[in-house]
Image (cartoon, helix red, strand yellow):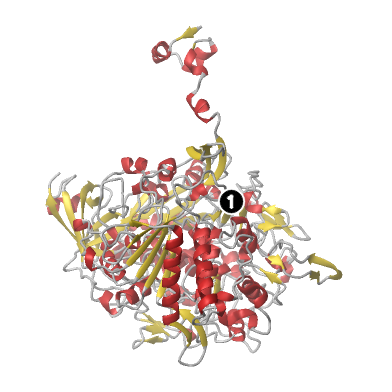
C-alpha cells in the first residue's frame, strides 16, 4: 500500500513501530529513494584517517568528480569506517566536522607575503616565494653558520634560523623535513611533542626502555581497574574512551582523579578532586600504602624489576635534594645515581632485598614520608577517597587482576611532568601490570601524528628511531658517538637491544648521504650538526626575544597560540627578519603582525618581519601514514586535490631545498658539503612521493646481505626492501631512515595499508595496519608470563613459551627462541633487562620522583622540605623568572584544558565546531563565584603576571574549593581554543597566562598549574 510520507509519520507516531508497518506493506513511496544512497551513488569511496587526536579513527571519504578535463574531485561526505578495529564507525564531534575543515573559509589557496611594515597580504607566485625564501635561507646560513666550536670540534650548526614541524603531517613529510633540516645544520627545531608529550618519552624510556604507550586502545577493555589521572579521555579522546566503557560493562571500575569533575568523571564509578600540581604526592602516597600493606606482586617485582639491585655508595636524598647538586649551576652531577658494579661491569644485586642500599629499601624509605595524612594535607583529596584508590590498585597485585592508567597533558605539562609519569610507571611495576593485557601505562597522545614525528626525531637533540643527535662535548667523533650511545649489558644473559646502535646509526647516515657516506669519512658523521645545548621551544624563544634568531620556518604549527607567555612570543616574532608559515589554514602565528585591538594590540608599521604564507594540503588531499598513540602506522589515501594553488608539504620542502642547493652550486658558500652531498634519489627531485619516502623509512639492502648461518644463501639482495630491523648492518650495506619502522614496507608491499581486522585474541588485530616495533601491539609482553614462561593469568594469555619458541596472539617482544631457563628478562631495551624502580642517571631531576611545587605555587612553600620549594633542576631564563607571579598577588590556581567540540586551535576555523562551542569561557567554582559576586554568563578578566584574558564565566559545581595545608585553594578551569583567526567569536589567547618554564627533562611548558586572579568586569 502506498502512503505519503506525512501519512506514514502520523501513523507511526500513533504507536505502531515503523519496522512493523514496513512488514505490513505500509511504506511511503519516497522511501525508495533514500537520501544517503542517492547522494553517494556516483561518489568514489576513499579510506583515510582522522587528523585530530591520536586515537587514529578510520574515515570513509566520498568524492565527486571523475577526472574529466577541468573537473576536479571534491570531498562531499565523510563518515566513520565501520571496519576500523578501534573506532568501528564512530566519529567524535571533531571528526564529524571534518568536511567543514576541508572546505573551511580559512583554507589558504595561494602563496602570499606580508612585506616589512605592511598591513596587508600580497599574493605572489610560487616561483617568487621559493626564490625569495631560498635567498633568505642561504644568506642567513652563510652569515651565521658555525663550522667549528672553540675547541676545534666540527659542529656544523646553524642557530640563527629555527624550525617547527607539524603534528598532523604524515610520516613522509616528517622524514623529508628531517633530511632537509639537518643538512642545513638546523638544531633549533621542535614538533608539537615538545609542547605536549615530551615527558612521556623521557619517563617511560627511563623506566621500561621505550618512550611510548605500552598497550592499545582496544586493550583497555581487558582491564579490571582503570585509573584516569592527568587526562580526560572522554573529552579529548572520546572514541578511544569507548574501550574504557567496554571494560566497565565487563565489571571494571573506573576512578577519575582530577582538579575538575570532567566528562570522564561523569561516567566513572568514583571521582576524587586534587590540587593541580600535587600528583606526585598522591602517587607517592600510593607507593607508600602498597608497601605498608604488602600489596606487591612479589614474583613479578623480584624477577622483572631492579628492586634487588644495589645502589652505589654516595647516593643520598636529604631535605629535598638528591646527591650531586651544584647550587651554582642549578644542576645535578648524576654520577652517584647508579648501581654498584662488580669487576666485570655487572650490577650487584641482593635477591633477599636485605641490603640497605638495594633499590627496594631506598624506595621504601623515600616514600615513607608520603602518608595518607600528608597526601590529604597537600593534595586536598579526601583521605577516605585516596585510600579507596589505593585499595583498588592494590587489589591488582595478583596474577589474575590488572589495572591500567590513562593519562595525557594533565601530567606532562608540569615542571615535574616526567616524574609524574615515572611515579605511575613504578606503581605498575610494583603491581605487575606492565606487559599484561589490560595493564600498562597508556599515554594518550593529543595529536594524530605526534607519535610519528617523535619517532622520526623532529626534536632539537633527536634523530629518527630515538637515536641521539651528536653532542659536541660527548660525541666529537664518530667513535665517541658509538661508544657513548651503545650500552653494555649490566646483567648476564640480557638482550640489551640498544647494543645494536651502530647498525641503526650507520644505516641512518647512509640514508642521509648515500654513496657519499663511506667508512673513510665515518659515514658522513661530521655533516650532521652537533648541539651544545637543547634548543627547545623555550630556549629558541628566549634567543629570539634577545634578537639572536633571524628566521623561523613554521610547518603546520601555530606557536603563537601554543607557546606560553603569548605576549613575549609575539614580541619575539617582531624581531625576526623573515618567517615562513606552511599551513593549510590561517593561523594567528602568520598574522601576529596584525592589530586586533585588545586581542593583539601591536604596532603593525613598526614590525619589519617579512612573513611568507604558503598553502599546503590537508589530510584529505595526500597519501601517507600517520602513527596513532598505540604505535600503529596507518596508511591513508588522497581523495581530492587541494584548493587553489596549495601543494603538499613534500613538494614545498623539495622545491625550497632544491632552490637552496642550486644557489650553493652556483655561488658556493659556507660549508656547502652537507647540502651538496645529501642523497636526493627521487624520480622527481621537486616532488618526492610518499611511496618513495615510506620505503626509505623501512630501509633497503645496498648490497647483498649474506646469511651468517649459511654463506651460500642471502637474507636480502641488493635493492630489496628489508623485512625487519634485524637485517640492518653496521658496514654500510643497508640504509634505513627510521630503524623502528623497518618492516612497514617490505618486499611484500605496504604493510601499513593492511585491513585485516581479525581478532587474534584479547582484541589484538595484528593484520590491521602495522605497529612498531616489529608489529608488536603490547610491548614488554614477555612480562605477561612468569619466569618459567607460563602466563600469569591463563585467561589473559597473550604469548607463552611452547617448548621451542615464544608465540601467541601478539608478536613476542623478546628473542623468540630464548628459553625461560636462559634467564633473559622482558625489558629488552634496558641493559639490565628489567624495569626500573630506580632509574639511575636517566633523568636530570632524580632517580626517584619527588614532590616539588609548581613554579607558581599557591602555598608559597613546600611542607615536605621548605628550603627546596620548586624542583632545583628547573631551567629558567632571567626574563621569564622576572615574570613569575606570587600567591599574594595572584591567589588562585589556573589550569588549561580541551573541549570535546574543539581540537587545539584548528577547529575554530570549522563551522560545525564553531556552532557547537562558539564563545570563550572559563570555569569558576560556586564558592569562588559567590565570594567575587560573579554569576553565570558574567564577563570576567583572568590575569597572571604575563597578561590577561576576558571571557564569559561558567559558574559550576565541577570545580570545588579544596582545603590544603589548612587554607582554602580555589582553581579556575581555562579552555584553550580561541583566537582571532576564526569563524567562531573572536577570543583571547589562553596561553597569555602561563609562565615560560618547562618540565626539567624535556622543557614541556607548565600549563596545568599557574597563578591567576579573576575579577568581574561585566554582567551577562
Which residue is at the far bottom?
Answer: 151
Front-most of 928 and 569? 569
Residue at 61% of width from left, 59% of height from top?
Answer: 694
Residue at 50% of width from left, 71% of height from top?
Answer: 660
User: Is residue 856 depicted above or below 990 in this figure?
Assistant: below
- Locate residue 616, reporting x and y percent: 45, 54
Front-most of 682 and 450? 682
Direction from residue 397 to residue 387 in the image, left or right: left
User: Is residue 461 depicted above or below 68 in this figure?
Assistant: below
- Locate residue 454, reporting x and y percent: 51, 64
User: Is residue 520 depicted above or below 755 in this figure?
Assistant: below
Quarter in which the C terminus is drawn: top left
Q: Check disc 1 and report the residue beneath it.
A: 635
- Locate residue 753, reporting x and y percent: 63, 49
Label 1: state its secondary structure. Answer: strand
Q: Residues within 10 Å of mark 1 (few under 14, many from 20)?
A: many
Front-most of 794 and 528? 528
- Locate residue 649, reporting x and y percent: 50, 58
Residue at 33% of width from left, 48% of height from top?
Answer: 908
Residue 854 in view here? no
Amino acid at each position: 500500500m502506498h502512503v505519503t510520507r506525512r501519512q506514514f509519520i502520523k501513523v507511526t507516531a500513533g504507536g505502531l513501530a515503523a519496522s512493523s508497518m514496513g512488514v505490513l506493506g505500509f511504506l511511503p513511496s519516497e522511501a525508495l529513494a533514500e537520501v544517503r544512497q542517492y547522494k553517494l551513488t556516483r561518489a568514489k569511496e576513499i579510506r583515510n584517517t582522522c587528523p585530530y587526536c591520536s586515537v587514529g579513527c578510520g574515515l570513509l571519504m566520498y568524492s565527486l568528480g571523475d577526472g574529466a578535463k577541468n573537473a576536479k574531485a571534491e570531498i562531499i561526505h565523510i563518515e566513520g569506517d565501520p571496519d576500523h578495529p578501534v573506532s568501528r564507525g564512530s566519529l567524535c564531534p571533531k571528526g564529524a566536522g571534518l568536511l567543514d575543515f576541508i572546505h573551511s573559509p580559512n583554507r589558504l589557496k595561494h602563496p602570499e607575503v606580508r612585506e616589512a611594515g605592511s598591513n596587508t597580504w600580497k599574493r605572489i607566485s610560487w616561483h617568487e616565494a621559493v626564490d625569495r625564501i631560498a635567498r633568505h635561507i642561504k644568506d642567513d646560513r652563510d652569515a651565521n653558520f658555525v663550522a667549528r666550536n672553540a675547541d676545534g670540534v666540527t659542529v656544523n650548526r646553524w642557530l640563527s634560523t629555527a624550525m617547527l614541524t607539524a603534528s598532523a603531517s604524515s610520516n613522509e613529510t616528517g622524514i623529508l623535513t628531517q633530511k632537509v633540516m639537518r643538512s642545513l645544520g638546523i638544531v633549533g627545531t621542535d614538533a608539537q611533542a615538545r609542547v605536549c608529550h615530551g615527558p612521556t618519552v623521557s619517563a617511560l624510556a627511563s623506566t621500561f626502555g621505550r618512550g611510548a604507550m605500552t598497550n592499545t586502545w582496544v586493550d583497555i577493555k581487558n582491564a579490571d581497574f582503570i585509573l584516569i589521572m592527568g587526562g580526560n579521555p572522554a573529552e579529548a579522546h572520546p572514541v578511544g574512551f569507548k574501550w574504557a566503557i567496554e571494560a566497565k560493562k565487563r565489571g571494571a571500575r573506573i576512578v577519575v582523579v582530577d582538579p575538575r569533575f570532567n566528562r570522564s568523571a561523569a561516567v566513572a564509578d568514583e571521582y576524587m578532586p586534587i590540587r593541580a600540581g600535587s600528583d606526585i604526592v598522591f602517587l607517592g602516597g600510593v607507593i607508600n600504602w602498597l608497601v605498608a600493606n604488602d600489596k606487591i606482586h612479589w614474583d613479578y617485582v623480584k624477577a622483572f624489576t631492579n628492586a634487588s639491585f644495589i645502589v652505589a655508595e654516595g647516593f643520598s636524598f636529604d631535605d629535598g635534594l638528591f646527591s650531586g647538586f651544584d647550587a651554582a649551576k642549578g644542576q645535578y652531577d648524576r654520577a652517584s645515581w647508579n648501581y654498584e658494579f662488580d669487576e666485570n661491569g655487572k650490577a650487584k644485586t641482593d635477591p633477599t632485598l636485605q641490603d640497605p642500599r638495594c633499590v627496594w629499601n631506598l624506595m621504601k624509605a623515600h616514600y615513607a614520608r608520603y602518608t595518607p595524612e600528608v597526601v590529604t594535607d597537600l593534595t586536598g583529596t579526601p583521605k577516605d577517597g585516596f585510600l579507596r584508590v589505593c585499595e583498588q590498585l592494590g587489589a591488582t597485585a595478583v596474577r589474575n587482576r590488572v589495572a591500567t592508567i590513562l593519562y595525557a597533558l594533565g601530567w606532562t605539562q608540569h615542571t615535574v611532568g616526567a616524574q609524574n609519569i615515572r611515579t605511575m610507571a613504578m606503581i605498575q611495576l610494583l603491581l605487575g601490570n606492565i606487559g599484561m593485557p589490560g595493564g600498562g601505562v597508556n599515554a594518550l597522545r593529543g595529536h594524530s601524528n605526534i607519535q610519528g614525528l617523535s619517532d622520526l626525531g623532529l626534536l632539537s637533540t633527536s634523530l629518527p628511531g630515538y637515536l641521539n643527535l651528536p653532542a659536541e662535548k660527548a660525541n666529537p667523533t664518530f667513535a665517541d658517538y658509538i661508544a657513548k650511545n651503545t650500552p653494555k649489558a649490566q646483567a648476564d644473559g640480557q638482550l640489551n637491544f640498544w647494543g645494536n646502535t651502530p647498525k641503526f646509526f650507520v644505516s641512518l647516515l647512509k640514508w642521509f648521504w648515500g654513496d657519499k657516506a663511506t667508512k673513510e669519512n665515518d659515514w658522513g658523521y661530521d655533516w650532521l650538526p652537533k648541539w651544545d645545548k637543547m634548543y627547545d621551544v623555550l630556549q629558541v624563544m628566549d634567543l629570539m626575544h634577545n634578537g639572536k634568531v633571524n628566521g623561523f620556518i613554521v610547518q603546520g604549527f601555530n606557536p603563537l597560540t601554543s607557546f606560553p607567555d603569548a605576549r613575549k612570543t609575539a614580541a619575539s616574532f617582531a624581531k625576526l627578519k623573515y618567517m615562513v608559515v606552511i599551513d593549510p589554514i590561517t593561523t594567528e602565528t602568520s598574522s601576529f603582525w596584525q592589530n586586533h585591538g585588545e586581542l593583539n594590540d601591536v604596532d603593525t608599521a613598526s614590525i619589519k618581519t617579512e612573513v611568507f604564507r604558503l598553502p599546503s594540503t590537508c589530510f584529505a588531499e595526500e597519501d601517507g601514514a600517520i602513527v596513532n598513540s598505540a604505535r600503529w602506522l596507518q596508511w591513508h589515501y588522497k581523495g581530492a586535490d587541494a584548493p587553489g594553488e596549495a601543494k603538499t608539504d613534500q613538494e614545498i620542502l623539495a622545491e625550497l631545498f632544491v632552490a637552496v642547493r642550486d644557489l650553493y652550486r652556483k655561488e658556493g658558500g659556507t660549508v656547502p658539503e652537507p647540502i651538496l652531498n645529501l642523497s636526493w634519489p627521487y624520480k622527481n627531485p621537486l616532488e618526492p612521493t610518499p611511496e618513495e619516502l615510506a620505503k626509505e623509512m623501512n630501509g633497503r639492502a645496498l648490497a647483498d646481505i649474506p646469511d651468517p648461518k649459511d654463506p651460500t644463501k642471502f637474507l636480502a639482495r641488493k635493492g630489496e626492501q628489508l623485512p625487519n630491523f634485524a637485517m640492518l648492518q653496521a658496514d654500510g650495506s643497508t640504509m634505513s631512515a627510521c630503524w623502528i619502522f623497518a618492516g612497514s614496507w617490505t618486499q611484500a608491499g605496504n604493510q601499513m595499508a593492511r585491513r585485516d581486522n581479525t581478532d587474534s585474541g584479547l582484541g589484538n588485530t595484528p593484520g590491521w595496519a602495522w605497529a612498531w616495533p616489529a608489529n608488536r601491539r603490547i610491548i614488554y609482553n614477555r612480562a605477561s608470563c612468569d619466569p618459567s614462561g607460563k602466563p600469569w593469568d591463563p585467561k589473559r594469555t597473550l604469548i607463552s613459551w611452547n617448548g621451542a619458541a615464544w608465540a601467541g596472539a601478539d608478536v613476542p617482544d623478546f628473542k623468540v627462541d630464548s628459553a625461560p631457563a636462559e634467564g633473559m628478562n622482558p625489558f629488552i631495551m634496558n641493559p639490565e633487562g628489567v624495569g626500573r624502580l630506580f632509574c639511575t642517571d636517566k633523568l636530570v631531576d632524580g632517580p626517584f620522583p619527588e614532590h616539588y611545587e609548581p613554579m607558581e605555587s599557591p602555598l608559597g612553600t613546600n611542607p615536605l622540605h621548605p628550603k627546596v620549594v620548586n624542583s632545583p633542576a628547573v631551567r629558567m631564563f632571567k626574563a621569564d623568572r622576572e615574570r613569575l607571579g606570587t600567591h599574594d598577588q595572584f591567589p588562585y590556581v589556573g589550569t588549561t584544558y580541551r573541549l570535546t567540540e574543539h581540537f587545539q586551535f584548528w577547529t575554530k576555523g570549522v563551522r560545525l565546531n564553531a556552532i557547537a562551542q562558539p564563545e570563550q569561557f572559563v570555569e569558576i567554582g560556586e564558592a569562588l563565584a559567590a565570594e567575587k559576586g560573579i554569576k553565570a554568563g558574567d564577563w570576567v578578566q583572568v590575569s597572571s603576571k604575563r597578561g590577561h584574558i576576558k571571557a564569559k564565566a561558567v559558574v559550576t559545581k565541577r570545580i570545588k574549593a579544596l582545603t590544603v595545608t589548612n587554607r582554602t585553594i580555589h582553581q579556575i578551569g581555562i579552555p584553550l581554543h580561541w583566537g582571532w583567526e576564526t569563524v567562531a567569536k573572536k577570543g583571547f589567547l589562553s596561553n597569555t597566562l602561563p609562565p615560560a618554564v618547562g618540565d626539567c627533562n624535556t622543557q614541556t611548558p607548565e600549563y596545568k598549574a599557574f597563578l591567576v586572579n579573576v575579577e568581574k568586569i561585566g554582567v551577562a
